[in-house]
Amino acid sequence: MTHILTLVASDTPLTEKHFDLLGSLKTTPDWLERSKAVDFKIDTTLSIEEIKALRRAFDGDKIDVFCTAEEGRKKVLFLADMDSTIVTSETLDEMAEEAGLKDKVSKITERAMRGEVDFHGAIKERVGLLNGLSIEALSRTLNQTEISKGARTLLKALKNEGVFCALVSGGFTFFTGAIGEKLNFDAHHGNVLNIENGKLTGGVQDPILDKNAKLNFLKLYCEELSLDLSETIAIGDGANDLPMLEAAGLGIGYHPKPLLEDKLINCIRHTDLTSVLYMQGYSSVL
């Protein structure tokens, strides 16, 4: 089966000199965007060790390397994590800053995203620390939340192509609803905070949306839309995204934690979210 090797530049423009780093993989270049993104047809997919070697070769100029199947390259269902993916921050950590507890909470978050602690226990512990935090504090956090570079272009292009887009987050519906609406996602899913009299109670409603729930949403949408998993694309940055990313037709780590970078062929390490489009062969929309 023919595969496509894609190079996407960040700060340093792509030139033909970079192509020599591909060695025997170098074929006729097909520019998606001159000096920015280029495709090469290759006979087979790359192993994780081969892709890691290419990453190292291109790291100096901060160029990302991707490998996708040519057949069915453009997907029709897109699932995205929210925190540190579609938005630049971890919204729970930013909520904790409002309570003066960011350092304590962010350390738990980092360990959870690396897969070092149980996600259920970590989310309950962190939310518990925020007992009494006001809705106004959540609103301030939302207003300060930044959309990741390339996210608007990505969603606009996918929606123009009729792709169904869902935000699936281990964060909270208070944020997924607003971010999903802002970017025109078709659906959003997250955990629900317990709120009484305008303040957090320190609890979160069951069932908790975790890595298994993310995978289940991927399968559920495939069933509802009569799609095969091969027709799907998913993106995320942490350990709780891994089952969903491994099951999707194209699973992408976005500035990923080490666990994801070690397991996934396609990781956006230097560039922005428009690389999701280049990976699928988009060019004219950018």
Image (tube, rainbow, N blue to C red):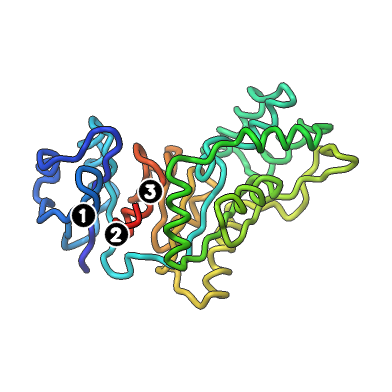
Residue with the mark numbered 2: 281
Q: Does any portion of residue 115 appear in the rendered image?
A: no
> Between tags 1 and 3, which lies in front?
3
Task: Identify residue type, mark 1.
Answer: Asp
Do the residues bearing badges 1 and 2 touch, measured as CB atoms within 8 Å? yes
What amino acid type should be assigned to the residue bearing mark 2? Gly
Mark 1 to mark 2 CA distance (whole Å): 8 Å
Look at the numbered disc 1 and give the secondary structure of its residue.
strand
Residue 243 x/y as whole percent: 50, 55
Percent position of residue 211, x then y: 58, 52
Q: Amino acid at mark 3?
A: Thr
- Judged left or right of residue 69, residue 115 is right
The residue beneath circle 3 is 274
Residue for point 11% across, 42% down: 16
Residue name at image x 37 percent, y 43 percent: 268
N-terminal label among 3 and 2: 3
Q: Is residue 54 left or right of residue 226?
A: left
Give SS at disc 3.
loop
